[in-house]
Amino acid sequence: MSAATVSNALSGKGRVSAEMVEKIRATAAELGYVPSQAGRALRTGRTGVIGLVLPDIANPLFPQIAQAIELAASSSGYGVLIADSRGDVSTQTKAIERLIDRDVDGLVIVPRRGTRVADVGCPVAVIDTPSTPGNTVAADHWGGGQQIAEHLKALGHRRVLIIGNNPASNVQNDRAGGIRSVFGQGLHTDTLWIEPLEKVSGKGCPLGLAGKVAEGYTAFACISDLHALRALTELQRAGINVPEKASVTGFDDLIWSPVITPALTTARMDMTEIAAIAVAALVKAIRERDPFDPEIGAPVTAEKSKVPMHLVVRQSAAAPPALQPVHTTATAATSVTEGGHQS
Amino acid sequence: MSAATVSNALSGKGRVSAEMVEKIRATAAELGYVPSQAGRALRTGRTGVIGLVLPDIANPLFPQIAQAIELAASSSGYGVLIADSRGDVSTQTKAIERLIDRDVDGLVIVPRRGTRVADVGCPVAVIDTPSTPGNTVAADHWGGGQQIAEHLKALGHRRVLIIGNNPASNVQNDRAGGIRSVFGQGLHTDTLWIEPLEKVSGKGCPLGLAGKVAEGYTAFACISDLHALRALTELQRAGINVPEKASVTGFDDLIWSPVITPALTTARMDMTEIAAIAVAALVKAIRERDPFDPEIGAPVTAEKSKVPMHLVVRQSAAAPPALQPVHTTATAATSVTEGGHQS
DNA sequence: CTGAAAGCGCTTACAG
DNA sequence: CTGAAAGCGCTTACAG
């Protein structure tokens, strides 16, 4: 039989009798025949591969993202090519170019620190935060912040320190903004922007949290579990019991969050759904596009662009009673440092 | 001019005059011409893409590995397609098949829990541990264990608890074996295999380390920073100061290890070199192979297959004097739990 | 319903 | 040193 018939039978494009399709399918399976991607790509202009670009591949969130994108992509018949830029913007631009040069059909970009998504000659799905222009889909970081704040508020906390590391990040600002929006009503929050990880010398870099406890802060709402881990260990080291004397919360539910002592209360993104929406929107744009027309790319849009975050409660001791509400009376400030027993 | 000349000029395959090459290069750059991978792949039988297979993509080591492999591969002109198997063996087999079906030129596999690398129709580089048959290149996990042990020994530790989570893992056994080989000489070690992460309920899962301290253990040599983190926070929570009352060490230098309090002493793999060697060996095998001959794949070999680990010392308090050597006298056992002040 | 033909863009012998 | 030709494996009109 002819190659054309085989092609039509395997792709189910019709115009082939049912029995022929059956016979061809069986023979193909028996021979282990798989159509060559190269031939198909050359003919159709589509490679069936999308690129995944993360400006900071060293981010501990990367496994979650990569896993979710890979699952969503392979479910739609796409492969995932990764590109790394090691935090550097020019390297990132080159990385994107390499992906384009490899004829990816589309790109999923998780930008940090303001990636330019212009001039890319293929559809692009952007995963950032709903308040960022051009965002395709993302977790509701603001809403996640609100959930964290409601939880802390219900525990009796009245003075909360928000800890982030990048005031230029939309994601971080939305998370912090969500927290403040709940605590802003007569209660007290302050924000501590700490050194980014890369700049930390290596021999630790204390955040001075014992002092913050002395000032009356009873909760540390960290913008990432990574910061929460720094906060938690520093507090523990200072002899301040968590969660009895101070609460620590994070974001992202990183892999170790459930297994440390005490386990972290955190807000988790539904990366599976986010990835599914991003890939679906991307695939739709790819299919609608003329593959031989090298137009300028613009971020694709999805119907649902904001995915709720899930609060995961693992620490839940009430705030130290003596400290509520503290910023009017400074009385309790000394009592909380008493627990310290550094040697 | 003809396509053949352009092809020869751009690939530098010679038989083109220098001035012609110059002119063609300039014009290509000006037009932004990039040869189509699809056409090339169809003609040469090579896609210029390698697959990266990790049985457990959620592993926090993944960013390090992916970054290193991506760098090495792109330096050699290769793209990296990722495949995930979410810890499941059958999913992993399918993931490998998908990569093969996409005509990858070769595979880099980081096996966990005994991956079968047989019957793969392309060259494969295996990154496991030097003592595993078929390993292409890996960190010297045994030697890393020895370095950790020497460090602990020099600090005066005489009773060390090794903590791992997978007795079936060659990597973990080599690390533990290296530690034991140093402490085996008259000193005491024991090994605690803890629940794998996936099986932990979520509300924490204490390892009972306070009890181990009471038994006279002064150091906890964890097979991964992930376990070290569990150990450290549990000890801190129990009021046992680290490193004064007990030392905690890890492996892998995961991203948070330098920034927690106290920072972790750990043994780091040189993933950059490992990746470079693995990719170089793989690329060599790919180039030597007839791309149209679908032979059975066997792991490729590299000249240098064992890369030293680097000890990163960040905690260095001496062992509690009263506890050396402890397993002959149980006197000090009670004094170390006194520090506990859980509420 | 099935098959013969054209052509996607490249590279590699081969001829000039 | 340069160019014309063939062909990698596929899919898509088109003809039968």
Image (tube, coloured by chain):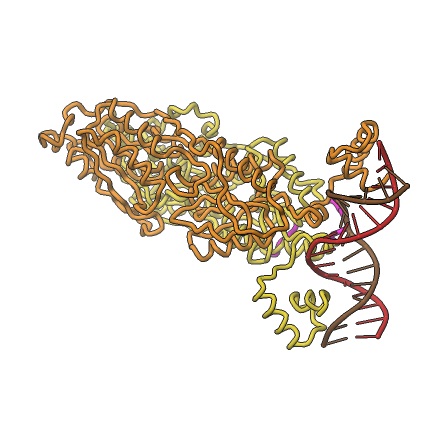
Chain colours: A orange, B yellow, C red, D brown
Q: Position of residue B169 (x, y in %)?
A: 54, 36
Q: Is residue A39 left or right of residue B205?
A: right
Residue B292 among magenta residues: yes
Q: Position of residue A342 (x, y in %)?
A: 21, 38
Q: Is residue A126 above or below residue B336?
A: below
Which residue sits at x=55%, y=32%? B87
Q: Main secondary structure of the magenta part?
A: loop
| Number of disc labels | 0
Q: Position of residue B198 (x, y in %)?
A: 48, 28
Res. B62 in view: no
Q: Give B175 or B268, whichever is nearer the viewer.
A: B268
- Magenta part of the chain: B291-303
Quadrant position of residue B77: bottom right
Assign the C terminus of chain A to one quadrant of the image.
top left
Quadrant position of residue A36: top right
Quadrant position of residue A162: top left
Res. B208 in view: yes
Residue A237 among magenta residues: no
Q: Give A190 or A12, whichever is nearer the viewer.
A: A12
Q: Is residue A327 above or below residue B25?
A: above
Q: Give A240 or B7, whichever is nearer the viewer.
A: B7
Assign the N terminus of chain A to one quadrant of the image.
top right
Q: Position of residue A113 (x, y in %)?
A: 38, 48
Which residue sits at x=71%, y=70%? B1
